[in-house]
């Protein structure tokens, strides 16, 4: 038997990473753990991750965080401006206060004027409109609110007097999940096609590539618009929820090709690698090779492509809804909210109606830096 | 094609007998990928290896030695030829045209060690998984028995068994080669094809791995086909050596014979060209005019004749055959018996 | 940036063309500081072929890149001097015309750029990546000529063809208009040598120029380089890990290990009378063709240590069979003379310690 003659220098305890891990510790870390380590070093991407965590939490608890029911209309507050807040009470006390608002119709301009009146306290953990928290339990607890009949409109109200703050939060539920669901489908379709193409090559590859090329020729937005317009009108048998899911399917049908192509390249490279040959000469089946050798190596790339695809989906859904081809009423997303603010005149007079666009920008930014960070963590040598 | 005029007897101390092996790669052009020609990577190779021996397979880039090795182990499909293998249980089998199923009982007896220590280990698997995979696939061991076997294999190649929970990225090139060797040994093979196993390693590490390979050969009764381009390494480890040129085998002999009294002009040129690690052995190389022949469009007759300084008319008309010109020294040259060629030391030693 | 080019008052007979003095080149990375060169000193004799030998990580390439001021961030020359002697050939040897301290020059300034390619040229291992695939061979050679010599394009083209002929490229008139991918490996390497020689440099640095070539092509290229060197009186610095190539090409050798030079000797002494344990171990660990010895190889135990690890003492001690505990692991031995024109850095021959650490 051969004994490896070790050198007299113990290198196990040499610290080899920024985080203070020794060689011995780093040696036991899997590729995934190493990638996580590299990801965490990237401050901007961590920011993106935190932003997304915050956004998802906010929209999940949207009904709790928003003081009003997103659907209820207030005839007295059409296009109402954001509620003013003050840190001083009516007698100068310290605390969070807002104002009673009275509505008057100005005869000359034929517009409603909202005049602030008495200062009233902002209450926390109040009882208000009832809803189902996380879709599960019925409750009527809200984080904050004002004593009835006063209402707080942090982001103002829309044309029908609905609370924009709550609507942005609730609309976010749709916008932020459409991306995830769509990406799931993209992953499945893209991986299947890409892996098959890359591993077997030959005719399979030729045919699949031609299919991908044909689909890619269609311009994205018109294709989405056409497919969405082809969906049936909402009815008892085809509910809003059905429409919502089909919209996500449509979005992903057009975007899986990028992943398929990327994966094809990677799988081709892996299938020609020596470790695959080693598995073959040990007698491994194609199934085992794809499962144990191709996919784990490709997984990191799939995650990256998926993360970078989400902003596209969010924008896609926003675009469709903006064009009126997306969700059906009364379901709404950020795209629907933005579409309600289409006219310049309206925006100039009531700029708070554009706040949903800010939400979209923040979400897309967060996903983009997250995706960039993931890509750098996964393959630090790629451009 | 370099066909042997004499056949080898399939005695029991012979392990591998390859005849007329051809591996061609199609060249596709055009919209519908029509096959317009073939790259004749391996074009009629005959070789044989006795049990317990090491046959070195040398040649320059493009000669087809790596392709030959991969064809013998059936990672590639030959277009023609026979690969006779002396299977311990099933006797002599011809592997050349077997399908995947038929090859299954053969796989465990022929294994391979790869050149690149970085791409030969799956970065996603632990060393234990990598070395144990052949055992898992063939249902030879599982659970704690598998762990024990893997530990034993690691010890055999000189690595600590604790390393099996580590990942390949933690190891140097030399250590990764050891892991690859442990994997190759997992199934107790008879024939191991070593595809440039030390070329990618540092000079001082090469010795470690070469010694390991030698020790393992005697401990486990292994037979090696050692494919390499470094003639010094091949001289050290091989008992017999075969030289390839543009897909054909041009000479096969005992190491000493081949190196010190070669019978083929190409071998002579190779030996003269190798830089010797001795400042007192500085001689002028034999200049080979022209370029290496194109395997997709080789010259007529002997593939080497355009560059050979001993070429005569017959060389461009008739292809020479690989024949035994005495004492198991095979050469494919029309004038093998007549020429007196320089060996490594510059004289006919 | 002051240029320390001083003309000496009386020409001195020198035989060193490049003097590398105690160079420390460090790479500042996320993982820590990699001390690629930890006090490298070399005197390159003029008009000869010097081999710089070592395994991966020893710093042989970085040494020459430092001399050419091609070390890019995060690498930096932290300490030390590199002096280029502008020499004039005389009957007896060389006379010093001028001394230039390269380390004092701006790495990308006009003076260094004039030296680089003009007086010091470099050729690399992989001709495919060193030659620009988008330009013809002629274009690339002409670029160097036009940068360093005052000639017009037509003359530059003539010179390019001439230099291609000189490197024994077949059909130089047609090769000059070909692209790298149209040439074979050997031809590409010849093209690269042509590029390097096009401005008749005083020093040619060859970084593993034949490692990627087949043995028959390698032999021809080495032969060519030897002939050109004799003809032009050029100094060649030949970086390699292949001891066979060293034996065939070099007049003297510097052996490096982990960022330091551990032995300097003539070619004969290196092979027949090595003094440093690393040199000896290296020679014993390689199979030597023609030796007809069936002796078992003696590997050097252990592995090359991590460049980020700080080793106190002699860099080779963990793998040394002559290791002396308490001494070798505490301090770095100084480089001392161990024979006529031979130096080694080892406590077996001295108790002197490396001065500045």
Image (cartoon, rainbow, N blue to C red):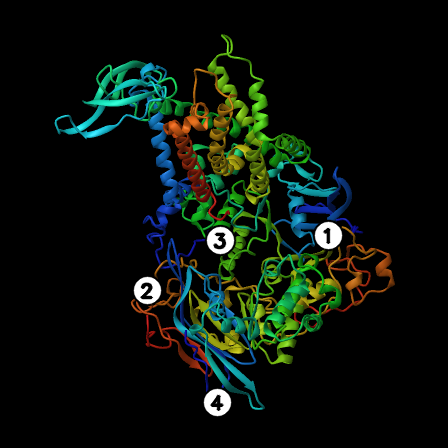
On what subunit does the disc labeled 3 rest? B
Q: Mark 4 or mark 2, which is nearer to you?
A: 4
On what subunit does the disc labeled 1 rest? B
Residue wearing tag 4: C12
- How far is the residue under mark 1 from the one under mark 3? 30 Å
SS state under label 1: loop
- How far is the residue under mark 2 from the one under mark 3? 25 Å
The image shows residue B80, relative to residue C340, as above or below, that is: above
10 Å neighbourhood of mark 3: few (<14), some, or many (≥20)?
some
Residue wearing tag 2: C312
- How far is the residue under mark 4 from the one under mark 1? 60 Å
The answer to whether tags 1 and 3 share a subunit is: yes
The answer to whether tags 4 and 1 share a subunit is: no
- Tell me whether circle 4 and circle 1 mark residues in contact (CB < 8 Å): no
Task: Identify the image quadrant of residue C319.
Answer: bottom left
Which residue occupies the foreground of this view, A233 or C135? A233
Residue at (59, 38) in percent of width and height:
A280
- Tell me whether circle 4 and circle 3 mark residues in contact (CB < 8 Å): no
Which quadrant, please, contains the N terminus of chain C? bottom left
Image disc number at residue A220: none
Residue wearing tag 1: B247
Residue wearing tag 3: B173
- How far is the residue under mark 1 from the one under mark 2? 53 Å
The answer to whether tags 4 and 3 share a subunit is: no
Compared across the picture, whether C257 is left or right of B336 comes to left
- How far is the residue under mark 4 from the one under mark 2? 40 Å
The answer to whether tags 1 and 2 share a subunit is: no
Q: Mark 4 or mark 3, which is nearer to you?
A: 4
Which quadrant, please, contains the C terminus of chain C? bottom left
Outermost residue toward the top? A236
Which residue occupies the foreground of this view, B37 or A74? A74
């Amino acid at each position: 038997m051969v004994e490896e003659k070790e050198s007299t220098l113990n290198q196990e305890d040499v610290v080899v990473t920024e985080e203070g891990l020794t060689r011995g510790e780093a040696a036991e870390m899997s590729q995934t753990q190493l990638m996580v380590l590299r990801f965490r070093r990237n401050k901007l991407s961590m920011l993106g991750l935190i932003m997304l965590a915050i956004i998802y939490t906010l929209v999940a608890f949207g009904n709790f965080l928003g003081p009003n029911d997103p659907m209820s209309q207030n005839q007295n507050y059409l296009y109402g401006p954001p509620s003013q807040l003050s840190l001083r009470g009516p007698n100068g006390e310290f605390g969070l206060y807002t104002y009673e608002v009275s509505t008057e119709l100005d005869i000359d301009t034929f517009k409603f004027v909202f005049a602030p009146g008495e200062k009233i306290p902002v209450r926390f953990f109040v009882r208000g409109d009832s809803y189902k928290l996380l879709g599960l339990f019925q409750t009527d607890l809200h984080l904050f609110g004002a004593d009835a009949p006063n209402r707080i409109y942090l982001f103002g109200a829309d044309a029908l007097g609905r609370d924009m703050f709550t609507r942005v939060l609730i609309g976010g539920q749709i916008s932020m999940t459409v991306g995830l669901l769509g990406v799931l489908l993209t992953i499945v379709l893209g991986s299947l096609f890409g892996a098959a193409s890359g591993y077997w090559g030959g005719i399979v590859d030729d045919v699949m590539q031609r299919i991908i090329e044909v689909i890619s020729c269609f311009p994205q937005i018109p294709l989405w618009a056409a497919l969405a317009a082809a969906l049936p009108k909402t009815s008892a048998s085809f509910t809003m929820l059905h429409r919502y899911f089909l919209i996500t399917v449509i979005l992903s049908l057009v975007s899986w090709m990028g992943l398929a192509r990327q994966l094809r390249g990677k799988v081709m490279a892996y299938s020609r690698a020596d470790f695959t040959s080693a598995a073959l000469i040990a007698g491994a089946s194609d199934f085992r090779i794809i499962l144990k050798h191709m996919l784990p190596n490709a997984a990191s790339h799939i995650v990256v492509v998926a993360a970078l695809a989400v902003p596209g989906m969010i924008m896609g859904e926003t675009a469709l809804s903006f064009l009126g081809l997306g969700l059906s009423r009364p379901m709404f997303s950020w795209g629907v909210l933005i579409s309600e603010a289409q006219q310049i005149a309206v925006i100039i007079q009531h700029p708070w109606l554009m706040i949903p666009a800010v939400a979209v920008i923040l979400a897309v930014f967060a996903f983009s830096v997250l995706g960039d960070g993931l890509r750098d963590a996964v393959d630090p040598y790629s451009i | 094609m370099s066909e042997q005029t004499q056949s080898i007897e399939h005695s029991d101390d012979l392990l591998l007998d390859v005849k007329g092996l051809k591996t061609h790669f199609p060249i596709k052009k055009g919209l519908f990928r029509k096959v317009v020609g073939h790259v004749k990577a391996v074009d009629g190779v005959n070789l044989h290896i006795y049990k317990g021996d090491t046959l070195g397979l040398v040649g320059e880039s493009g000669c087809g030695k790596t392709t030959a090795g991969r064809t013998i182990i059936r990672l590639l499909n030959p277009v023609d030829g026979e690969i006779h293998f002396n299977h311990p249980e099933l006797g002599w089998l011809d592997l050349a045209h077997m399908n995947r199923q038929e090859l299954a009982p053969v796989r465990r007896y022929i294994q391979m060690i790869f050149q690149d220590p970085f791409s030969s280990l799956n970065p996603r698997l632990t060393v234990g998984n990598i070395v144990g995979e052949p055992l898992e696939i063939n249902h030879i061991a599982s659970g704690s028995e598998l762990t024990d076997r893997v530990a034993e294999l690691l010890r055999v190649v000189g690595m600590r068994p604790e390393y099996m929970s580590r990942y390949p990225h933690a190891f140097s090139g030399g250590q990764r080669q050891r892991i690859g060797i442990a994997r190759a040994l997992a199934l107790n093979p008879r024939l191991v094809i070593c595809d440039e196993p030390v070329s990618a390693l540092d000079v001082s590490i090469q010795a470690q791995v070469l010694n390991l390979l030698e020790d393992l050969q005697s401990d486990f009764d292994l037979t090696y086909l050692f494919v390499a381009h470094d003639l010094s390494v091949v001289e050290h480890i091989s008992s017999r050596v075969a030289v390839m040129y543009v897909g054909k085998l041009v000479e096969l002999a005992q190491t000493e014979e081949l190196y010190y009294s070669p019978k083929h002009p190409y071998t002579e040129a190779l030996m003269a060209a190798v830089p010797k690690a001795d400042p007192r052995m500085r001689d002028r190389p034999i200049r080979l005019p022209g370029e290496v022949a194109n395997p997709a469009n080789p010259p007529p007759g002997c593939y080497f004749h355009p560059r050979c300084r001993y070429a005569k008319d017959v060389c461009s008309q008739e292809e020479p055959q690989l024949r035994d010109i005495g004492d198991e020294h095979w050469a494919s040259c029309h004038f093998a018996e007549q020429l007196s060629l320089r060996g490594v030391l510059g004289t006919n030693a | 940036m002051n240029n320390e080019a001083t003309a000496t008052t009386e020409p001195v007979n020198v035989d060193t063309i490049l003097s590398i003095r105690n160079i420390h080149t460090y790479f500042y990375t996320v993982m820590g500081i990699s001390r690629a060169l930890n006090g490298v000193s070399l005197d390159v004799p003029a008009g000869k072929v010097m081999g710089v030998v070592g395994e991966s990580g020893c710093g042989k390439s970085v040494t020459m890149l430092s001399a050419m001021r091609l070390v890019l961030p995060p690498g930096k020359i932290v300490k030390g001097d590199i002096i280029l002697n502008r020499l004039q050939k005389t009957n007896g040897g060389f006379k010093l015309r001028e001394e230039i301290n390269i380390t004092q020059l701006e790495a990308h300034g006009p003076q260094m750029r004039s030296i680089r390619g003009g007086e010091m040229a470099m050729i690399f291992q992989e001709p495919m990546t060193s030659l620009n695939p988008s330009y013809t061979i002629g274009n690339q050679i002409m670029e160097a000529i036009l940068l360093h010599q005052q000639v017009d394009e037509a003359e530059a083209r003539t010179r390019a063809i001439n230099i291609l002929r000189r490197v024994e490229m077949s059909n130089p008139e047609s090769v000059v208009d070909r692209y790298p991918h149209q040439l074979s490996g050997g031809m590409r390497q010849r093209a690269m040598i042509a590029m390097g020689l096009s401005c008749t440099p005083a020093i040619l640095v060859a970084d593993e120029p034949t490692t990627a070539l087949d043995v028959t092509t390698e032999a021809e290229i080495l032969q060519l380089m030897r002939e050109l060197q004799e003809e032009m009186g050029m100094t060649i610095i030949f970086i390699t890990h292949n001891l066979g190539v060293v034996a065939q090409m070099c007049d003297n050798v510097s052996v490096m290990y982990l960022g330091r030079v551990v032995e300097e000797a003539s070619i004969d002494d290196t092979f027949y009378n090595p003094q440093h344990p690393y040199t000896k171990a290296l020679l014993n660990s390689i199979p030597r063709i023609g030796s007809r010895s069936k002796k078992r190889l003696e590997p050097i135990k252990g592995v090359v240590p991590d460049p980020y690890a700080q080793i106190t003492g002699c860099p080779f001690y963990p793998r040394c069979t002559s290791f002396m505990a308490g001494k070798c692991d505490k301090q770095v031995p100084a480089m001392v003379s161990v024979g006529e024109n031979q130096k080694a850095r080892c406590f077996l021959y001295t108790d002197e310690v490396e001065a500045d650490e």
